[in-house]
């Protein structure tokens, strides 16, 4: 291996490490906010006049919307790029969280929680797609482990914080959840996708159009 090859390989390795750390932080922040509202959410729905069954629907809508939207979001990411989808997902989640501060009904909460799921699903798909396209095969397993580790860490800390805050200050959790998602956009904006990805997307778009 020549000196130039070694320098190039070292540079790619450093970029991969920065990408993994950035995406791990992004996923951690979003999922900490996403799960912080979970412990008190059923109580909050009952305060809005909803039944226990409706509270269950609200809880389930987040995950249902996330699952159903991931494949379409993956197609969008392949066409438009991973970073735009990642940032759009974070913004969508943040807007949905802040919207809980409005005077809403229990049924509107289903729509807002579903919108949160779409945002979280889009961000997760975009993050994993970035890893697949930017990290070398020999580091990819560790990279995926870091992403899922960040997600699980957020899910572990979020509910603990939410249960400590309690139902009285539920509005604080909605506000904090939205702000955390908006804040996650800051490291996400620093991500630079490989130049080859844009060329490949342009080629696929031209091919699909013919």
Image (cartoon, helix red, strand yellow):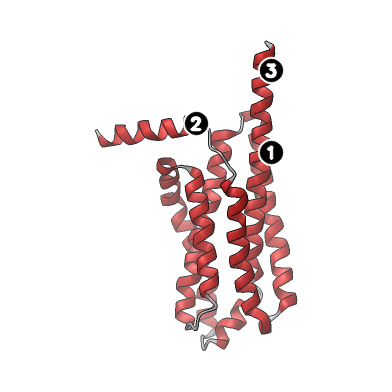
Residue 13 quadrant: top right
Q: CA distance from mark 1 to mark 3?
A: 22 Å
Sequence-wise, the earlier of marks 2 and 3 is: 3
Q: Which residue is mark 1?
A: 142
Q: Is residue 10 left or right of residue 135?
A: right
Q: CA distance from mark 2 to mark 3?
A: 20 Å
Horizontal and vertical percent for residue 74?
45, 47
Residue 12 quadrant: top right
Query: Quick one: which residue is furthest to the left in this view?
Result: 210
Q: Which residue is mark 2?
A: 195
From what the image shows, is residue 201 above or below residue 99?
Answer: above
Q: Residues within 10 Å of mark 1 (few under 14, many from 20)?
A: few
Q: Element at badge 3? A: helix
Horizontal and vertical percent for residue 177?
62, 67
Q: Is residue 79 left or right of residue 23?
A: left
Sequence-wise, the earlier of marks 1 and 3 is: 3
Q: Element at badge 2? A: helix
Q: Residues within 10 Å of mark 3 (few under 14, many from 20)?
A: few
If the image is split into quadrants, where does the C terminus sit? top left
If the image is split into quadrants, where does the N terminus sit? top right
63 or 106: nearer the viewer:
106
Q: CA distance from mark 1 to mark 2?
A: 24 Å
Foreground mark, 1 or 3?
A: 3
Sequence-wise, the earlier of marks 1 and 2 is: 1
Foreground mark, 1 or 2?
A: 2
Q: Residues within 10 Å of mark 2 (few under 14, many from 20)?
A: few
From what the image shows, is residue 98 above or below residue 82?
Answer: below
Q: Which residue is mark 3?
A: 6
Q: Residue at x 46, y 42 (%)?
A: 81
172 or 118: nearer the viewer:
172
Report whether residue 126 is seen.
yes
């Amino acid at each position: 291996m020549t000196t130039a090859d070694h320098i190039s390989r070292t540079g790619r390795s450093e970029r991969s490490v920065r990408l993994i750390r950035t995406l791990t932080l992004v996923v951690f922040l979003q999922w900490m906010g996403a799960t912080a509202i979970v412990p008190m959410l059923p109580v909050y729905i009952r305060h809005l006049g909803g039944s226990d069954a409706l509270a269950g629907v609200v809880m389930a809508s987040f995950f249902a919307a996330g699952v159903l939207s991931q494949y379409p979001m993956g197609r969008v990411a392949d066409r438009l790029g991973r970073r735009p989808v990642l940032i759009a997902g974070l913004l969508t989640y943040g807007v949905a969280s802040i919207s809980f501060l409005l005077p809403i009904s229990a049924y509107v909460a289903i729509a807002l929680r579903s919108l949160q799921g779409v945002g979280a699903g889009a961000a997760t798909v975009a993050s994993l797609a970035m890893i697949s396209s930017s990290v070398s095969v020999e580091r990819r397993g560790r990279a995926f482990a870091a992403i899922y580790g960040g997600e699980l860490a957020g899910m572990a800390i979020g509910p603990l914080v939410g249960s400590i805050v309690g139902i009285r200050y539920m509005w604080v959790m909605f506000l904090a959840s939205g702000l955390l998602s908006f804040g996650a956009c800051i490291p996400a904006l620093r991500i630079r996708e490989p130049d080859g990805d844009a060329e490949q997307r342009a080629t696929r778009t031209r091919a699909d159009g013919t």
